[in-house]
Image (tube, grey):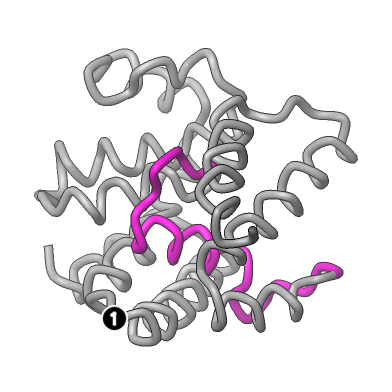
Amino acid sequence: MDLKEAKALARSRMGDKRFEHTLNVKKMAVKLAKHYGVDPDQAALAALLHDTAKEMPTSEMLELLRSHPDLAGDTENRPTPVWHGICASILARTQWGVTDEAVLSAIACHTTGKPGMGALDKIIFLADMTCAERSWEGVEALRTLEMQDLDEAMLSALEQTVGYVLRSGRTVDEMSARTYEDLKRTLAPARG
């Protein structure tokens, strides 16, 4: 799937506001990719596809997860707000011809992260949080940090995400907690 096809597909699967968000994520992801020496086309493709399942009804997402247990893992036991990334990754792999494992991974983990994240995973996660229309308290500091240190930015982003989920009275997804602990361990030697 080329970028033009991905953009058209994204446009067909989401409303105007989400499509604008998707284009903003793409712009930020490409900027970060260039800054960190990651293929900007990979970043653009993952960004364009990251929310393509977001507007699917929960029942359809559940059906998709159950029809691909090898790709879905235990997703159906996780909070439903994280399903769309895994579902978009499954659709990209099984229906849209995406074979790039880094792109598929970045799509799948863009809401929770995962232990051992690659650079593209981190870029899509961060671009989704810091793209142009985001205006939450602390976003400017995270935008600055993500241009200085991808790992420190991820740790800060996960702290923000977990705090937001807890303040909303929801349960923190176990994968987010595992990702946070993994990043803390990874960064501990550098922090002294």
Which residue appears at 54% of the width and 64% of the height?
A: 126
Residue 161 is covered by the magenta coloring:
no
Q: Name the residue nearer the viewer: 173 or 154.
A: 154
Please state if 88 lies on the left or on the right of 83 as rendered. left
- Residue displayed at 24% across by 65% down: 6
Q: Residue at x 48, y 20 (%)?
A: 59
Kind of residue sitting beneath label 1 = Gly
Residue placed furthest toward the front: 192
Q: Which picture quadrant has residue 47? A: bottom left
- On the question of residue 11 being in view, the answer is no
Magenta region: which residues?
Answer: 112-137
Q: Is residue 128 above or below residue 74?
A: below
Q: Position of residue 63 (x, y in %)?
A: 36, 17
Residue 139, relative to residue 106: is it above or below? below
> Where residue 85 appears, x then y in whole percent?
43, 42
Eyeballing the image, is 131 above or below 96? Answer: below
> How many residues crowd mark 1 within 10 Å: few (<14), some (14–19), many (20+)?
few
Seen at 15% across and 49% down, the residue is 96
- Answer left or right for 87 relative to 22: left
